[in-house]
């Protein structure tokens, strides 16, 4: 199992024999910069892709764990957000073009040489984030909280 910093997560499948394989990637800030995501600053997320290659399909399990830095929606200070995500996925090989794909099911031409999981991994991180980024109660910048309180209409 080789660990590498990733800006793209592409798994080669051409010539891969049947069996179980594991790929380990580290997502740093450069991965998110590629998507021009300005909400995420300082990221360190481990990605483990466990893959079982069968003759007609590939079963995968994608596991994300780590943290990233975002701005607090209340005081604009830095907040470390934990990231955890786990999802199974099946890759089917089919010559017929099928428009229906889902997050858990990908269709590839049998002549495909690789699986590009870059967008899927990025989307998975974004989906795992909370809708609102806030410090725990009492941890916001006190000066900013005073300014907000002075502007609040009672």
Image: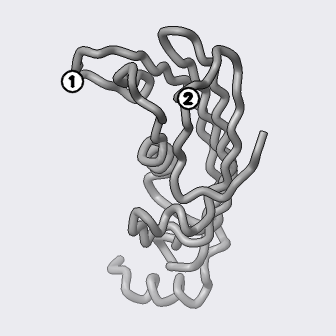
Disc on res. 132: none
Q: Residue at x 70, y 20 (%)?
A: 20
Residue 112 seen by the camera: yes
Which residue is labeled 1 in the image? 99
Q: Residue at x 51, y 53 (%)?
A: 8
- The alpha-carbon separation of the residues under discs 1 and 2 comes to 22 Å
Graded by Cα atoms within 10 Å as few (under 14), some (14 to 19) or many (20 or more), the crowding at tag 2 reads: few
**Residue 124 locus on image (x, y percent):** 49, 43
Q: Decide: marks 1, 2 in contact (CB < 8 A)?
A: no
Camera-side residue of 70 and 90: 90
Q: For the residue labelled by badge 1, is the local secondary structure a helix, a strand or a loop?
A: loop
| Location of the C terminus (image quadrant) | bottom left
**Residue 132 locus on image (x, y percent):** 46, 58
Q: Is residue 1 left or right of residue 29?
A: right
Q: Check the image and report above or below for 11 versus 98.
A: below
Q: Check the image and report above or below for 62 versus 83.
A: above
**Residue 57 locus on image (x, y percent):** 49, 14
Question: How is this picture coloured?
Answer: one colour
Q: Residue at x 52, y 29 (%)?
A: 14
Which residue is labeled 2 in the image? 87
Badge nearest the viewer, 1 or 2: 1
Residue 136 seen by the camera: no
């Amino acid at each position: 199992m080789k660990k590498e910093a990733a800006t793209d997560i592409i798994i080669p499948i051409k010539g891969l024999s049947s069996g179980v394989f594991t790929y380990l990637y580290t997502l740093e800030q450069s991965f998110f910069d590629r998507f021009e995501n300005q909400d995420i600053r300082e990221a360190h997320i481990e990605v483990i892709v466990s893959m079982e290659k069968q003759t007609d399909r590939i079963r995968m399990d994608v596991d994300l764990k780590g943290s990233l830095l975002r701005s607090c929606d209340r005081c604009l200070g830095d907040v470390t957000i934990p990231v955890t995500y786990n999802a199974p996925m099946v890759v089917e090989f089919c010559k017929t073009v099928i428009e229906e794909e889902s997050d858990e099911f990908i269709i590839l031409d049998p002549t495909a040489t690789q699986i590009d999981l870059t967008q899927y991994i990025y989307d998975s991180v974004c989906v795992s984030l909370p809708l609102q980024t806030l410090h725990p109660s009492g941890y916001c910048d006190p000066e900013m909280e005073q300014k907000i309180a002075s502007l609040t209409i009672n």
